[in-house]
Amino acid sequence: MGRVRVITDTNSGLTQKQAAKLGVMVVPMPCLIHDKVYYEDRDITREEFFRQLEGGEHISTSQPSPADVINTFEAALEEADEAVYIPMSSGLSGSCQSAMVLAEDYDDRIQVVNNRRVSVTQKSSVLDALAMAENGMDAVSIRKELERRSAESSIYIMPDTLEYLKRGGRITPAAAAIGTLLRIRPVLQIKGERLDAFAKARTAAHGRAAMLTAMKKDIEELRSCEKSAGIRLYAVHGNIPGLQKEWVRQVREAFPGFEVEEDQLPLSICCHTGPVALAVACTVIPEIS
């Protein structure tokens, strides 16, 4: 066999169809609605998920079951000598640590990356892993390089409302009530392992401007990274395709000369931000020799 299989989960935003085209295996993440478990992109569509979310249903996400992870590991090793698994950031979910424990039974043939990423930055790591594997790197070397470069990314997200952060316990009901009264739109940041507050905006326009200004600063810093082959830049949204077109245009105008990719936030993030959320993200493309 001799090649390395790349595995990720649906927190990367990759659908099963997209992953099949890339040659990547994807573990579906479970979400709970009325105590019933659904698996993203397997038995619940994005449309149904957002219909339930906007209808006021309490939705929570969970780790994939050990059985699902083990079955994916086994399937990968039927096709290749080794595999690299790139799960959601260990700071946002316990699924990374759980996968590391499960991988101990495979004599280093399964390498679990402590990715520190989610959404499009996690997907970017998947693309990097594929390129490294194509270049002949083994699973251990790929894991080490992805972990070494894990901080070379940034995401800013602006929800339209504080309601979903309140539902998920990210902020208190009192803070949500005050923020709603003052019409505050939070700008959140994922840089490394945590989802943190970055800024507060009184209007959507101010929030978008704050995200773009912050991203310009981050890109200037990331351009100096060792062995960089460029920057991937993403304009991302939850479930607002009409506004997404305007957002993409705005990001492209702010970053002339960059190729801006359009994408959607994974459902695990939308649980906390709600459907009306905009984001901008970037990652360093490693130079692979």
Image: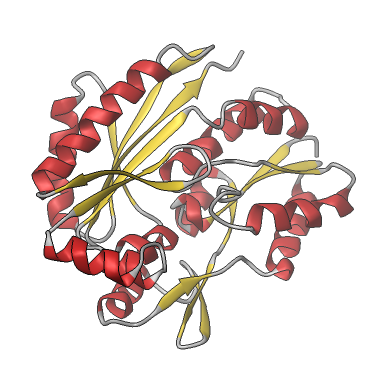
Which quadrant would the N terminus be assigned to in this image? top right
Q: Nearer the viewer, residue 64 or 131?
A: 64
Residue depicted at x 18% and y 21%: 256
Residue 55 x %, y %: 26, 82
Q: Is residue 271 above or below residue 156?
A: below
Q: Is residue 54 above or below residue 198?
A: below
Residue 9 x %, y %: 56, 55
In this rendering, position of residue 135 left or right of residue 47:
right
In this rendering, position of residue 19 left or right of residue 262:
right
Q: Nearer the viewer, residue 59 or 139?
A: 59
Residue depicted at x 42% and y 19%: 222
Q: How is the image coloured?
A: secondary structure
Q: Quadrant of residue 235?
A: top left
Q: Nearer the viewer, residue 273 or 135?
A: 273
Which quadrant would the C terminus be assigned to in this image? top right
- Does the image show residue 276? yes
Q: Is residue 115 above or below residue 167?
A: above
Q: Quadrant of residue 128?
A: top right
Residue depicted at x 21% and y 24%: 255
Q: Nearer the viewer, residue 255 or 41?
A: 255
Q: Quadrant of residue 262?
A: top left
Residue 99 x %, y %: 72, 55
Residue 125 x %, y %: 53, 36
The number of numbered badges drawn on the structure is 0
- Does the image show residue 259? no
Residue depicted at x 49% and y 55%: 11
